[in-house]
Image: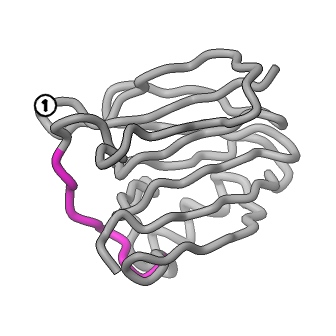
Amino acid sequence: MVRRIVTGNNAQGKSYFVSDEEVAEMYIWQSPEGAQLGEGTPMLPSTAPGIEPPSGGSKVVRVQMEPWKEMKARLAHGEISGLDADGFHRTATIDYIMVVGGEVDLILDEARATVRAGDLVVQRNTNHAWHNLGETPVDFWGVMVSVLPG
């Protein structure tokens, strides 16, 4: 069993949790054909294009996220492009994020959840921030898949 958290945007363009459940299937997420973000859901503009893969492409990243007290100071000094002072950003991607060590809070416009080692997040073009409230880095892997035509 794997905890799978899926995000989405509501009709007002606010990010929220579509689901948070334990799944036992071999596949983790399957988008209906032609509806990667959800039926009738418009693509919202990216605020952090510098971290995205090229249109039609994908990108694999390993993140060792520092504690929020350190990250907040870096954001205040403008050291991380595309993120606001609270770490919020949105990309034109569907991301599959697996936490492999530690725990981190995923913050959306309308909710917050603690994501732990072994949990998977399916992030779908939503405004979000990650806050590591612990004292040591959190380790996670992400696969970013562009939802823009190649």
State the image coordinates of residue 24 (x, y, percent, origin top left): 76, 20
Assess whether residue 103 is covered by the magenta stretch.
Answer: no
Please, what is the dominant secondary structure of the magenta stretch? loop
Q: Which residues are magenta?
A: 42-51
**Left or right position of 21 against 80:** right
Residue shown at 69%/70% (left/top)? Answer: 61
Instruction: Give the quarter of the image for residue 63.
Output: bottom right
Q: Which residue is mark 1?
A: 11
**Left or right position of 5 against 15:** right
**Residue nearest the observer in this picture, 33 or 76:** 33
State the image coordinates of residue 85 (x, y, percent, origin top left): 39, 61
In which quadrant will I find the N terminus? top right
Q: Is residue 139 above or below residue 31?
A: below
Residue shown at 36%/77% (left/top)? Answer: 49
Residue shown at 36%/44% (left/top)? Answer: 33
Q: Callout 1, which amino acid?
A: Ala
